[in-house]
């Protein structure tokens, strides 16, 4: 099962660590974490994307997932 990770980034300082720990939990449960932070970092040219381009890409990722893991504070995401 592909599980998309959703959580706050802006206004936080530890988001990378929180996303990493969440991805590890998902893997331990036998599923595939879809970490938008990791994927966009590895996608060529993504560092120059606008907010709208990032959102469009992330919606595409969501369409390939079976579930969403909502981290604490996800509503601020």
Image: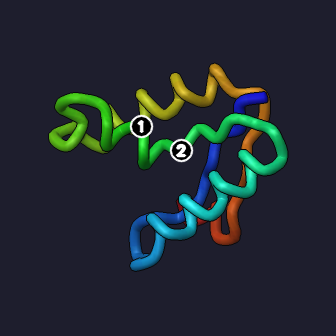
**Snapshot quadrant of residue 39:** top left
Residue 60 at x, y = what percent?
A: 52, 23
Q: Residues within 10 Å of mark 1 (few under 14, many from 20)?
A: some
Residue 48 at x, y = what percent?
A: 15, 40
Q: Nearer the viewer, residue 75 or 8?
A: 8
Could you tell me which residue is drawn at 64 percent across and 20 percent down? 64
Q: Image height check: is 43 above or below 7?
A: above
Residue 41 at x, y = what percent?
A: 31, 43
**Element carrying mark 2:** loop
> How far apart are labels 1 and 2 at the CA level?
6 Å
Q: Are marks 1 and 2 in contact (CB under 8 Å)?
A: yes
Q: Which residue is mark 2?
A: 35
Q: Nearer the viewer, residue 55 or 22?
A: 22
The residue lying furthest to the right in this view is 29
Q: Which mark is residue 75?
A: none
Left or right of 37? Residue 66 is: right
Residue 42 at x, y = what percent?
A: 31, 36
Q: Which residue is mark 1?
A: 39
């Amino acid at each position: 099962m592909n599980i998309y990770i959703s959580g706050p980034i802006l206004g936080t300082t530890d988001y990378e660590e929180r996303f990493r720990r969440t991805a590890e939990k998902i893997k331990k449960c036998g599923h595939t974490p879809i970490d938008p932070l990791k994927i966009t970092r590895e996608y060529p040219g993504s560092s120059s994307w606008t907010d709208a381009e990032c959102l469009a890409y992330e919606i595409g990722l969501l369409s390939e997932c079976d579930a969403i893991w909502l981290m604490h504070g996800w509503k601020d995401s």
